[in-house]
Image (spheres, coloured by chain):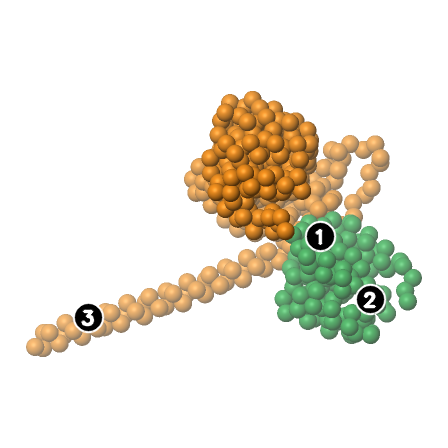
């Protein structure tokens, strides 16, 4: 009994001792972390103040014929004292200071443009950060690669463009996304050429991101979208055709007509037909009328629907023919398109209903209700 | 109205940069970090122009602008809004409320200073 009590007592003391040691360790750890954080905040504040002055201080005006290198020489003269100060630090402190300074540069980079941004870009490069970020594009951790891709864009590291193009093929989607955003920042609309060549398997998610980028450029994007329709990846071709229809610039009509007529892939031809309908350019009407009689059902259906989008009276005869001869899907599409083809289209719907009430009556009634048109004569 | 430029921006590094730049071009600058302080200082100092970020804590730039335009003492003070590029609706709201103009981020400090000086150079009521 007394042995058991002794063991119990020893165990209790040992557990209490461990708890005290653990608590003390946690308190010391928290205190050290807080101290480090405050020290870093102090360093950040100092570098932010230094950068503020370096970014907006006046520099001597250069003569009009001065080369771009003279600007860079001035920027180098501004940053030289800071570089010397960093070089004098111990390796450990240099690492801490460089990390904080990098954060300062990135934070300024998000908000500045103009000559101040040019100085910032130069400082970022001259301090060796571009090389660091480029090295991080090869890091084994995807979040490091993604951050590097993002920061290279924020700080407009133009000599990183090639590596960012490479990052478009990164296995992780977040890295690819950041590389994409950075290329757009660095190269503007011209980046679309590279991006649309590099992307593969455009899914719903990255289609939204890509479409946001394309729509920034509107008609500026059209030539690049037209080029990219030839992509071997069907999802890219379909995406580009969708974007051309969305932008609505009629310079896309001719290339889309060509694709609707001759492209070897039926899905892409159908999408091009739909896009022609949405563009509403009368140059496409004859082609759409012909395709509405094409032996391939998918193309016929797309053309019938597209004629409804153009609302052209010239298509009424072929729409009526499709309504008479087509299956349920074509019948419904033809009736809808006739409903959108003005008074003559509505008159044709009355004719069809009178001709075969059983076949056309229910569909015409449904479409009339959908479109708010009156088909039955008073 | 005084000759002071009131700067309201919550991000310290940007606030300090704007303050430094405007002082560098010879302007008299007071800087604050939130909307409530901006409104208080505007009523106290009656600055010649207010440079105001839209997204700020306590009161947004739009709320401050609305309050300024409803106060007889401050309604004539020109206000230049600073906004992120994606905030078009807020810019439109600000212009409807009577903001003089706006500048989007990322911004050029040189352009900002030029715009402020242009407003200050106009004859005052």
Q: Which chain is orange?
A: A
Corner quadrant of residue A115 = top right
Q: Residue furthest left?
A: A1
Please name the residue that numbered disc 2 is placed on: B77
Which residue appears at 73% of the width and 73% of the height? B40
- In screen coordinates, is A55 left or right of B121? left
Please name which of the two marks, 2 or 3, marks the residue nearer to the observer.
2
Q: Residues within 10 Å of mark 3 (few under 14, many from 20)?
A: few
- Regarding residue A127, the answer to whether it shows in the image is no
Real-space Cα separation, disc 3 to disc 1, in angstroms: 67 Å
- Regarding residue A249, the answer to whether it shows in the image is yes
- The subunit letter for the residue under badge 1 reads B
Q: Are marks 2 and 1 on the same chain?
A: yes
Question: In which quadrant will I find the N terminus of chain A?
Answer: bottom left
Which residue appears at 74% of the width and 53% of the height? B103
Instruction: Between residue B96 and residue A329, name the one nearer to us.
Output: A329
Please name the residue that numbered disc 1 is placed on: B104
């Amino acid at each position: 009994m007394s042995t058991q009590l002794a063991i119990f007592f020893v165990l209790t003391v040992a557990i209490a001792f461990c708890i005290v040691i653990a608590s003390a360790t946690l308190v010391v750890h928290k205190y050290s972390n807080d101290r480090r954080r405050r020290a870093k905040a102090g360093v950040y504040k100092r570098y932010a103040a230094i950068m503020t002055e370096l970014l907006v201080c006046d520099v001597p005006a250069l003569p009009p014929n001065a080369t771009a290198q003279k600007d860079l020489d001035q920027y180098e003269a501004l940053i030289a004292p800071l570089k010397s100060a960093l070089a004098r630090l111990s390796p450990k402190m240099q690492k801490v200071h460089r990390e904080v300074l990098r954060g300062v540069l990135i934070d300024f980079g998000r908000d500045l443009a103009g000559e101040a941004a040019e100085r910032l870009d130069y400082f970022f490069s001259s301090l060796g950060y571009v090389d660091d970020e480029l090295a991080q594009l090869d890091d084994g951790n995807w979040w490091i690669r993604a951050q590097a891709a993002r920061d290279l864009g924020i700080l407009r590291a133009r000599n990183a463009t090639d590596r960012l193009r490479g990052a478009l093929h990164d296995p992780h989607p977040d890295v690819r996304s950041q590389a994409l955003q950075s290329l757009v920042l660095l190269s503007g609309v011209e980046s679309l050429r590279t991006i649309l060549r590099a992307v593969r398997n455009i899914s719903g998610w990255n289609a939204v991101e890509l479409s946001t980028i394309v729509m920034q450029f509107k008609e500026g994007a059209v030539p690049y979208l037209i080029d990219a329709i030839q992509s071997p990846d069907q999802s890219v071709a379909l995406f580009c055709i969708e974007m051309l229809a969305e932008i609505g610039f009629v310079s896309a009509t001719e290339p889309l007509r060509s694709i609707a007529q001759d492209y070897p892939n039926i899905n892409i031809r159908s999408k091009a037909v739909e896009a022609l309908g949405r563009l509403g350019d009368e140059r496409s009407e004859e082609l759409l009328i012909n395709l509405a009689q094409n032996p391939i059902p998918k193309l016929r259906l797309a053309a019938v629907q597209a004629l409804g989008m153009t609302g052209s009276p010239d298509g009424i005869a072929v729409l009526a023919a499709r309504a008479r001869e087509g299956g349920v899907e074509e019948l419904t599409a033809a009736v809808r398109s006739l409903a959108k083809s003005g008074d003559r289209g509505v008159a044709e719907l009355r004719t069809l209903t009178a001709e075969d009430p059983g076949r056309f009556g229910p569909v015409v009634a449904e479409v009339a209700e959908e479109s708010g048109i009156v088909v039955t004569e008073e | 109205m005084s000759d002071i430029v009131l700067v309201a921006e919550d991000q310290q590094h940007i606030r300090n940069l704007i303050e430094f730049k405007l002082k560098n071009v010879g302007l008299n600058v007071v800087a604050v970090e939130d909307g409530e302080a901006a409104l208080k200082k505007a009523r106290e100092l009656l600055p010649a122009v207010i440079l105001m970020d839209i997204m700020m804590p306590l009161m947004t730039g739009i709320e401050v602008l609305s309050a300024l335009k409803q106060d007889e003492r401050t309604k004539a003070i020109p206000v230049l809004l600073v906004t992120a590029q994606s905030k078009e609706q807020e810019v439109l709201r600000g212009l409807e409320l009577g903001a003089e103009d706006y500048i989007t981020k990322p911004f050029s400090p040189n352009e900002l200073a030029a715009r402020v000086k242009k407003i200050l150079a106009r004859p005052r009521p």
